[in-house]
Image (cartoon, helix red, strand yellow):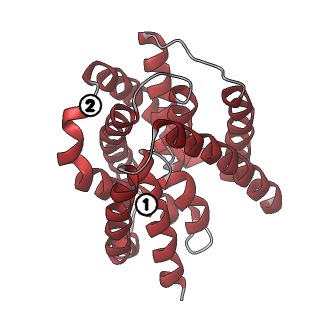
């Protein structure tokens, strides 16, 4: 029953991720924590996220903003060691609560039509935050969602660039987590079992993406920010 529930979770998260370029981790990880312990849930999420990016990769290359991708990846490389320290030493509940509060605050700012002026420095900083959160919680999306929700990038470019960035960031984070000794055969088995449901979600998400207009795309991101922030805060409070 637990594996069936986990399959439903990752399928829904994969649909969202393939459709928007965001959302798998912020949706899957909190619910996977109901089935697995924290470290296992994070690693299963990372492994499945790598799978999603690999499946989508052939269709993404043409729309990637390469200069932006390079800055995001460089920032992620700098942030990943910080994330590993968080992964090993920090209290996960307190960290989730802090992330949730930040998401809610920035969600309000975005809905008030806040527009970020993109720059090389801000691209790097956003990549750094994303890399730290990937290695620490397996959740690279929140900083990118907040940053790009107020920019003028087209949905296809945004989706492609972030998904390719996620592939690199997730891979580095998983390697670092294995190096610090946090991995097991059971995690690999669980990820393999959940792969078919994840793949099905990717296919459905791609079909939905073709039917989204830019306004609907941004509304979906805004809604995801609010729901994710509220869930993280409430979950951390209840856990405490």
Q: Is residue 47 visible?
A: no
Query: Label 1: few (<14), some or many (≥20) within 10 Å?
Result: many
Query: Label 2: few (<14), some or many (≥20) within 10 Å?
Result: some
* x then y, percent, for residue 192: 31, 73
Q: Quadrant of the C terminus?
A: bottom right
Q: Secondary structure at mark 1?
A: helix
Q: Secondary structure at mark 2?
A: loop
In the rendered structure, find residue 92 and report the number of the disc placed on it. Answer: none
Residue linked to disc 1: 15
Q: Earlier in the sequence, mark 1 or mark 2?
A: 1
31 displayed left or right of 47: right
In the rendered structure, find residue 64 and report the number of the disc placed on it. Answer: 2
* x then y, percent, for residue 212: 44, 47
Q: Is residue 75 above or below residue 236?
A: above
Q: Quadrant of the N terminus?
A: bottom right
Distance CA(mark 1)–CA(mark 2): 20 Å
232 displayed left or right of 50: right
């Amino acid at each position: 029953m637990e594996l069936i529930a986990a399959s439903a979770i990752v399928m829904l998260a994969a649909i969202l991720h393939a459709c928007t370029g965001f959302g798998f981790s912020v949706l899957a990880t909190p619910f996977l924590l109901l089935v697995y312990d924290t470290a296992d849930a994070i690693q299963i999420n990372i492994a499945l996220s790598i799978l999603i990016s690999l499946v989508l990769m052939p269709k993404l290359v043409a729309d990637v903003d390469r200069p932006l991708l390079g800055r995001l990846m460089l920032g992620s490389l700098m942030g990943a060691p910080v994330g590993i320290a968080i992964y090993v030493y920090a209290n996960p509940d307190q960290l989730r609560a802090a992330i949730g509060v930040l998401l809610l605050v920035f969600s309000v700012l975005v809905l008030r039509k806040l527009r970020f002026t993109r720059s090389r420095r801000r691209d790097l900083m956003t990549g750094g935050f994303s890399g730290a959160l990937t290695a620490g919680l397996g959740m690279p999306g929140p900083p990118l969602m907040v940053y790009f929700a107020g920019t003028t990038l087209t949905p296809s470019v945004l989706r492609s660039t972030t998904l390719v960035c996620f592939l690199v960031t997730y891979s580095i984070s998983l390697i670092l987590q294995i190096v610090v000794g946090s991995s097991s055969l059971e995690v690999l088995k669980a990820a393999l079992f959940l792969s078919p449901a994840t793949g099905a979600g990717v296919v459905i998400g791609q079909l939905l993406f073709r039917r989204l207009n830019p306004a609907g795309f941004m509304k979906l991101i805004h809604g995801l920010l609010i729901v994710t922030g509220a869930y993280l805060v409430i979950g951390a409070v209840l856990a405490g």
